[in-house]
Image (cartoon, grey):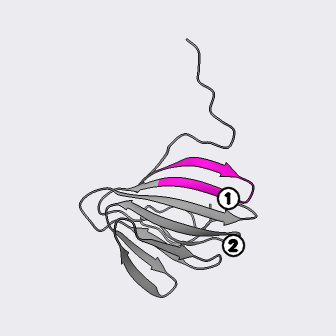
Amino acid sequence: MQSLAVPEGIAATELRPWGSFTVLEEGRGYKIKRIEVKPGHRLSLQMHHHRSEHWIVVSGTAKVTCGEKETLLSTNQSTYVPPCTSHRLENSGVIPLILIEVQNGEYLGEDDIVRFQDDYSRSESK
């Protein structure tokens, strides 16, 4: 059986306690992910030093915390998260939340996460 080659910079789907994400494309200074958040779950309240994020809701409703501001986004709505800004993504609805995340910055590694609060008892920084 021949194995299929995965293009460089493209990762398989990674499971998380809150859902999953898939890297769709990655290049110099940017990364595009498909993120799925299970109903009733949320990501950690976090911050990144080296990247900004732009979130576009594909389906479901997203409760977004960005700094001191809380916003509800539905299909085809988007928001921008600047670098060094605390933020959180939450699915308070009853269907899976699916969104596209576009990251921009000089460093896009998964270890550029400072966690302030986490429902799943993960460490403060990954």
Q: Which mark is residue 49?
A: 2
Q: Quadrant of the N terminus?
A: top right
Of the two numbered discs 2 and 1 in the rendering, the one whose residue sits closer to the viewer:
1
Circle 2: element type: loop
Residue 101 position within the rendered picture, expressed as x and y whole percent measured from the top left: 53, 61
* Residue 110 in view here: no
Question: Would you say 17 lies left or right of 3 here?
Answer: left
Specify start and end residues of the magenta stretch as a single range: 21-34
Mark 2 or 1, nearer chain start: 1
10 Å crowding of disc 2: few (<14), some (14-19), many (20+): some
* Residue 46 in view here: yes
Residue 50 position within the rendered picture, expressed as x and y whole percent measured from the top left: 71, 69
The residue nearer to you, when weighing 41 against 29, is: 29
Residue type, mark 1 in image: Tyr
Residue at the disc numbered 1: 30
**How far apart are labels 2 and 1 at the CA level?**
15 Å
Q: In this view, does 21 lie above or below 101?
A: above
Q: Residue 99 carries which label?
A: none
Rendered residue at 49%/74% (across/down): 79
Residue 23 position within the rendered picture, expressed as x and y whole percent measured from the top left: 57, 48
Q: In this view, does 67 lie above or below 2?
A: below
Q: Quadrant of the C terminus?
A: bottom right
Q: In which quarter of the image is residue 41?
A: bottom left
10 Å crowding of disc 1: few (<14), some (14-19), many (20+): some
Is residue 43 a member of the stretch shown in magenta? Answer: no
The residue furthest bottom is 68
The residue nearer to you, when weighing 115 against 123, is: 115
